[in-house]
Amino acid sequence: MTSEPSLKFPPASLPESTDKLRSEVRKFLLKSQTELGWTPRSNFMSTFSAEFSKSIGEMGWLGLTWPKKYGGQEKSALERFVVTEELLAAGAPVAAHWVAERQSGPLLIKYGTEEQREQILPKIAKGECYFSIGMSEPDSGSDLASIRTRAKKSPNNWTINGTKVWTSNAHINHWMILLARTEQPSENRHAGMSQFLIDLKNDDIIINPIPNMLGHHEFNEVVFNETAIPLDRIIGKEGNGWQQVTAELAYERSGPERFLSTYNVLLELINSAKNKNDGEIDRTIGKLTAQLVSLRTMSISIAGMLERGENPDVAAAVVKDTGNEFERQVIELTRKALPLEPTLNGNNIEKYESMMAELIMQLPSFSFRGGTPEIMRGIIARGLGVR
């Protein structure tokens, strides 16, 4: 007799020892903001500061859960959750190290060779090595099983042909983890894929900018045309790419960044309520706060699963999809409750009007980074056995 599929978020609590860590991170961030002069921003991927990432590395807060021999601290995933939450809540400029520390490093720890780990992981832990994600392609969106980028093996190297899009910060990062087909497509759409390390500074590739609606250059198109890379750049086993990439995406989809990109707007709404006796504002704050607390509880649960070595891919998809909906609701409900005209022309970017205008322009990108809602709901449906 087989058990029915189910979706569970086992209870997990942050240990009391993390209170001291949280206090230390907050003190550091206050000092850092004064010394480095950064402005709090809601969208964590829009704030690139090599100097800030290096300072976080010096504090030992990058690669917190990793083995010490790779520059880590061998702390728990719950302790890492606290650091991550504080960085996001403060609107710190974390984009430089974010992908590398969140998912690229853990992927290399699990599947990489010892040489790859020794070469790259200590640099990530120091905040000196940055990664991009090479998954999405033109005409594929978040349907990774439909990728067409090919990697062909010869006695001396791998030759890669294809195109990746929405590749955040590829023009300034050091490495990209590429998902490519190493076999012809078959009836099993998930078979025949592999992952590779791409040297964004030295490999023969073309990086084209994709400006966003604000005119900022964050996204890129990365083109491979007979690009040759060494044989030892493959990550893990040939043909095991799908299993590896789904494990990697669990790290990307489950953290507090999935629901804190509009956190500062909610704070602005809460601050505005202090001077008003407005029932609509109070009800909006109550609704959004309840959703935020629920999402945080689920995200902490997933941190507990990761700590136990589990692969919470379905639960992570739930947090990602629900978190994106929450971020959208923060913008929409706050605009109704606090109807000020969004503008990008203010002198102070921290002002509500400027913050709201910027997030309205960026909000469409929040839903597809890490997978669109349609893809997330497909993963959830399969995980529950209803598709």
Image (spheres, grey):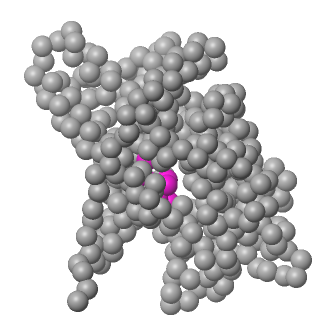
User: Residue 318 location in percent, x, y?
Assistant: 33, 57
Residue at x 69%, y 68% (from the top left corner) = 235
Q: Is residue 235 above or below residue 56?
A: below
Towards the viewer: 363 or 256: 256
Is residue 95 visible in this depiction of the protein? yes
State which region is magenta. 249-255
Q: Residue at x 77, y 66 (%)?
A: 233
Residue 253 falls within the magenta-colored stretch:
yes
Task: Residue at 85%, 74% (x, y): give it.
Answer: 157
Quarter of the figure with residue 285: top left
Does residue 300 appear left or right of residue 132 in this picture? left
Q: Is residue 168 visible?
A: no
Residue under the point 82% across and 72% down: 231
**Residue 100 falls within the magenta-colored stretch:** no
Image position, residue 211 (x, y; %): 60, 42
Foreground: 339 or 295?
295
Give how far across and how far down residue 170 sits, in percent: 69, 48
Where does the N terminus fall, quadrant-wise?
Answer: bottom left
